[in-house]
Amino acid sequence: MRFLGRFALKTAINAGALAAASRLIPGFEITGQSFPILGGLNIPPLAQSPVIGGLVLALLNIFLRPILKFVSFPLIIITFGLFSIVINFIILYLADVFLAELTIEGFFAFFAGSLLIGIVNAII
């Protein structure tokens, strides 16, 4: 039960980080789309895309991030942790590939978005 609570919290916080990034960073956009699976939860269609995006980011962070950290552990040590930004970049790129609603254009948008989402994920 504790896992599901933490997963729901990570999903909600990632959804908030995606929504904040779409408002603050030019080139980082989330289009509002209605998902039938979220129709019964009374979530407005404009907020459904960040919720699905937060779900995808939470899943990537839970399952893929530990593998990437294990594989790149020597690089993380050599760069004093700065290689974690590259890991955040990879996870955000995969979220962009998986989600049709998420559009990230340009290196600055990827970099700023990965920093913002990485900082939010480091806090939780």
Image (cartoon, rainbow, N blue to C red):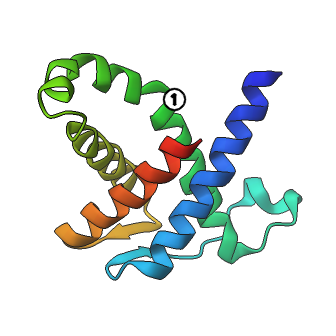
Category of crowding for the residue at label 1, using alpha-carbon neighbours closer than 10 angstroms: few (below 14), some (14–19), many (at least 20): few
- Residue sitting at x 51%, y 29%: 62
From the image, tell me which residue sits under label 1. 62
45, above or below 96, in the image: below
Work out whether residue 120 or residue 10 is closer to the camera in this orientation and state it. 120
**Quadrant in the picture for residue 80:** top left
Work out whether residue 93 or residue 35 is closer to the camera in this orientation and state it. 93
Q: Quadrant of the N terminus?
A: top right
- Residue sitting at x 57%, y 53%: 14
Q: Quadrant of the C terminus?
A: top right
119, above or below 113, in the image: above
Q: Is residue 57 in view? A: no
Left or right: 10 as drawn, with respect to 69: right
- Residue 45, position in %: x, y? 71, 74
Work out whether residue 81 or residue 99 is closer to the camera in this orientation and state it. 81
Kind of residue sitting beneath label 1? Ile
Query: Number of callouts in the render?
Result: 1
Q: Secondary structure at mark 1?
A: helix
User: Seen from this angle, which residue lies furthest front?
Assistant: 80
77, above or below 103, in the image: above
- Residue sitting at x 60%, y 58%: 15
77, above or below 34, in the image: above
Left or right: 33 as drawn, with respect to 23: right
- Residue 72, position in %: x, y? 20, 23
Left or right: 65 as drawn, with respect to 89: right
- Residue sitting at x 26%, y 46%: 85
